[in-house]
Image (tube, rainbow, N blue to C red):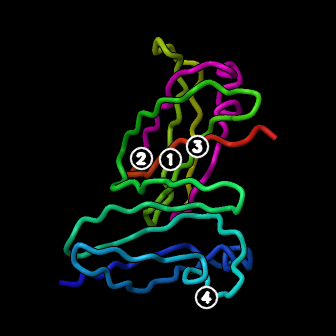
Amino acid sequence: PRRWVTPRRPDRVGQLAGRTAVRIWSVPVPGNGSAVVDAIALTRLLFPPTLNGWLRIDTVNTPLNVVAILDSSTRISTIPAQADAALQHLLARPPDTDALAGGIVIVNPTTTTVNAAISVLSVDGALLNTVTQAIPPGSSVFSLIRDLAPDANNRAGYVFVQGSAPLSVRSEEHTSE
């Protein structure tokens, strides 16, 4: 049997124009099958711009395994989707290097502003710094760990995020340019 998936993404072009829009459509996924939604389908443009944002996928009757494939013509990577938002997240973080800097992305899938307490911890669990950040409804924010806790530079450890409502959180590594 076919399953229907409803992807939603904030329209970043709309946000730049001073309004927030959400595009909603349904994608049929055959039983034991798969479906591909690419940047052309997301933007409805033949030559889509670079997309920066997040994608929410709602399914009525079946849990799905979802992965985003990022292809920049020189590099390719896959990112598994996070299944559910939660009140608390604990993420391991590798130390920064000359080439890579660690960061976190926090997504607020709700319709209200959510306050997030972001704590950076050392490997032994010692608190290095805590920052509180308001995450607007239906949006995402990215923060480098070194900006959240300057003392955490080049040190492995953990990031603990606690929200006033459920949030989706993931760690990312970015080039240190």
Q: Which mark is residue 172?
A: 3
Instruction: Name the front one of labels 4 and 2.
Output: 4
User: Can you give x and y, in whole percent of width and height, for residue 63 in the image?
Assistant: 24, 65
Label 4 vs label 2: CA separation?
A: 36 Å
Q: Which residue is mark 2?
A: 164
Kindly state the secondary structure of the residue where label 1 is placed: strand
Going from the N terminus, do you reach mark 2 or mark 1 first? 1
Is 96 rendered above or below residue 141?
above
Residue drawn 62% across and 39% down? 103
Mark 1, Cα crowd under 10 Å, few <14 / some 14-19 / many 20+, is some
Marks 2,1: beta carbons within 8 A = yes
Label 2 vs label 1: CA separation?
A: 5 Å
Q: Which residue is mark 4?
A: 44
Going from the N terminus, do you reach mark 4 or mark 2 first? 4
User: Can you give x and y, in whole percent of width and height, for residue 42 in the image?
Assistant: 56, 80
User: Can you give x and y, in whole percent of width and height, for residue 60 in the image?
Assistant: 24, 76
Residue drawn 56% across and 53% down? 77
Amino acid type of the residue that numbered disc 2 sits on in the rendered structure? Ser
Mark 2, Cα crowd under 10 Å, few <14 / some 14-19 / many 20+, is some
Give the side of residue 155 with respect to residue 81, left or right.
Answer: right
Instruction: Name the front one of labels 3 and 2.
Output: 3
User: Can you give x and y, in whole percent of width and height, for residue 54 in the image?
Assistant: 54, 64
Kindly state the secondary structure of the residue where label 3 is placed: strand
Kindly state the secondary structure of the residue where label 2 is placed: strand
Residue drawn 72% across and 57% down? 74
Judged from this view, the residue extending furthest toward the right is 177
- 141 in magenta: yes
